[in-house]
Image (spheres, helix red, strand yellow):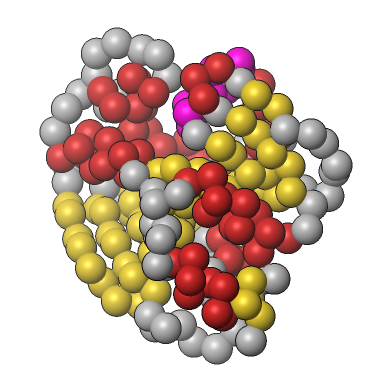
């Protein structure tokens, strides 16, 4: 069986020396990672900023964006932990397009980023260790390159929803980490939509609650 261009045998060999492939996103209680009318000029959709307000004042988030100070505590610990073992990132072209301008010349990733796209572009270097490599031959190829760059560290699947869905459909995700924000958006971009495969079993490995958000960790069972 081949998953996104990676055979079972090569994938097994790679996993023995590599970290996990992890999708980590904030979502509303009704399952949306962006509000309605999401687009280039409105990347999180109407009211979608509410899903990320819990991170903006955290010390670890501010540090990544070159800012001083910030709140500490359980949410900050969890956010900092999520960055610790990331050696490479995979994202979709739309996420790159919406983030390129606000990220500027010093993006917060500080690791190689692989952008899934149909456009042929060379690798672009930014300050702080971030590079953007544009991959035109699918999620399997993007993951293969990301794993090579990450070494023994994790590969983060940053989004958007269609990229996470593609990784799930190709059976390439090891973990799903969700930050459930207590808001109902009612409409928008669902994280788990358009899933065209047999039911998938998840093992809940960790739950942490805080006043602003509930953090859930799942391992994808195979």
Q: Is residue 36 visible?
A: no
Image coordinates for residue 96, horizontal then vertical, percent:
66, 36
Locate residue 79 relative to residue 143 in the image: left or right: left
Quarter of the picture containing the C terminus is: bottom left
Locate residue 49 relative to residue 202 in the image: left or right: right
Q: Is residue 84 visible?
A: yes
Image coordinates for residue 176, horizontal then vertical, percent:
40, 62
- Magenta segment, principal secondary structure? loop
Above or below, 86 relative to 63: below
Residue at the (44%, 66%) spot, across then down: 15
How many marks the image carries: the answer is 0
Quarter of the picture containing the N terminus is: bottom right
Above or below, 178 relative to 99: below
Above or below, 40 relative to 194: above
Residue at the (50%, 34%) spot, across then down: 111
Residue at the (67%, 44%) spot, across then down: 115
Pick out the residue farthest to the top.
68
Asked if residue 109 lies in the magenta stretch, the reply is: yes
Picture quarter containing residue 21?
A: bottom left
Residue at the (42%, 58%) spot, across then down: 18
Locate residue 196 relative to residue 55 in the image: left or right: right
Image coordinates for residue 81, horizontal then vertical, percent:
26, 42
Closer to the camera, 175 or 69?
175
In the image, the segment drawn in magenta is: 103-110
Image coordinates for residue 95, horizontal then vertical, percent:
64, 41
Closer to the camera, 122 or 221?
122
Closer to the camera, 183 or 132?
132
Asked if residue 51 lies in the magenta stretch, the reply is: no
């Amino acid at each position: 069986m081949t998953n996104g261009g990676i055979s079972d045998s090569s994938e097994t060999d790679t996993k023995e020396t590599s970290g996990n492939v992890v999708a980590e996103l904030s979502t509303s209680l009704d399952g949306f990672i962006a509000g309605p009318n999401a687009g280039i000029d409105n990347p999180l959709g109407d009211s979608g900023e509410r899903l990320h307000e819990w991170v903006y004042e955290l010390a670890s988030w501010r540090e990544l964006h070159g800012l001083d100070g910030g709140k500490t505590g359980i949410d900050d610990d969890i956010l900092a932990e999520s960055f610790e073992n990331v050696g490479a990132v995979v994202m979709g072209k739309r996420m790159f397009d919406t983030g390129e301008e606000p990220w500027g010349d010093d993006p917060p990733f500080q690791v190689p980023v692989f952008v899934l796209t149909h456009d042929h572009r060379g690798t672009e270097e930014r300050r702080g260790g971030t590079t953007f490599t544009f991959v035109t031959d699918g999620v399997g190829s993007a993951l293969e390159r990301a794993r090579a760059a990450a070494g023994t560290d994790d590969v983060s699947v940053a989004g958007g929803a269609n990229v996470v869905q593609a990784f799930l459909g190709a059976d390439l995700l090891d973990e799903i980490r969700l930050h459930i924000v207590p808001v109902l958006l009612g409409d928008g971009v669902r994280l788990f939509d358009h899933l065209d495969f047999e039911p998938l079993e998840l093992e809940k490995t960790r739950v942490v609650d805080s006043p602003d958000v509930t953090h859930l960790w799942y391992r994808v069972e195979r």
